[in-house]
Image (cartoon, coloured by chain):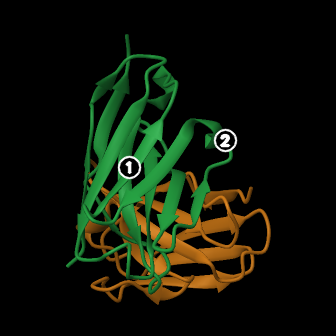
Chain colours: A green, B orange
Amino acid sequence: QITLKESGPTLVKPTQTLTLTCTFSGFSLSINVGGVGWIRQPPGKALEWLAIIHWNGEIHYSPSLDSRLTISKDTSENQVVLTMTNVDPVDTATYFCAHRGPDPDAFDIWGQGIMVTVSS
Amino acid sequence: EIVLTQSPATLSLSPGERATLSCRASQNILYYLAWYQQKPGQAPRLLIYDASNRATGIPARFSGSGSGADFTLTVSSLEPEDSAVYFCQQRSKWPLTFGQGTRLEIK
């Protein structure tokens, strides 16, 4: 059974760096085909894909946020970390991590999400 | 970037009725489309992948169709618990993109 859970600060100040951790179980990013992605959702708005890291180290970022994002994995700890630099109030959102399978090739299991507010 | 346009924005139907939700891509995405259901305060749940394949545990009243640029999610006989926002998402090209969502209300 695959599970994922996001952790990190729920309040950050503008210009700071946000670091979010996705801790997962039920699969391994070192031996299983698949990946972990990050998706966010501002209050009352649509989903926005941010980044993804695959088992083989392949990484992709949203072009609109590429310069501010870094995604990495710690296979020994079963964690994926997303950092976002220079945050702004418009980055206020619920941040989800999700498992992307090879079959199905979609975000088939999601974490519960973490609400992050950017405010001074 | 591939833009996904969902319609209608809101759909209000009664239990037992049939719901038809549309997702149109700005270019050909073959069959690389997924549908998700999101209820208030919850994470999205995968319903359909690769345009027409139901995910594990999804009731048979949910079905997906389409290819190329036009896709449809159909709920054949609505239940009260189907009240939610539905999003489509493409994996044909980077970056991955989502539609803006359709809110389905059950009267």
Q: Residue at x 35, y 58 (%)?
A: B84
Residue B41, placed above or below residue A98: above
Q: Residue at x 27, y 38 (%)?
A: A8
Chain at numbered mark 2:
A
Quadrant housing residue B27: bottom right
Quadrant housing residue B93: bottom right
- Asked whether the viewer can see residue A91, the reply is yes
Q: Secondary structure at mark 1?
A: strand
Mark 2 is on which residue type? Ser
Check disc 2 and report the residue beneath it. Answer: A64
Residue A81 is tagged as 1
Residue A24 is tagged as none
Residue A105, placed above or below residue A7: below
Chain at numbered mark 1:
A
Image side of residue A111 versus residue A39, left or right: left
In the foreground, A66 or A75: A75
> Horizontal and vertical percent for residue A68?
57, 36
Question: Which residue is most to the right?
Answer: B27
| Disc nearer the start of the sequence (2/1) | 2
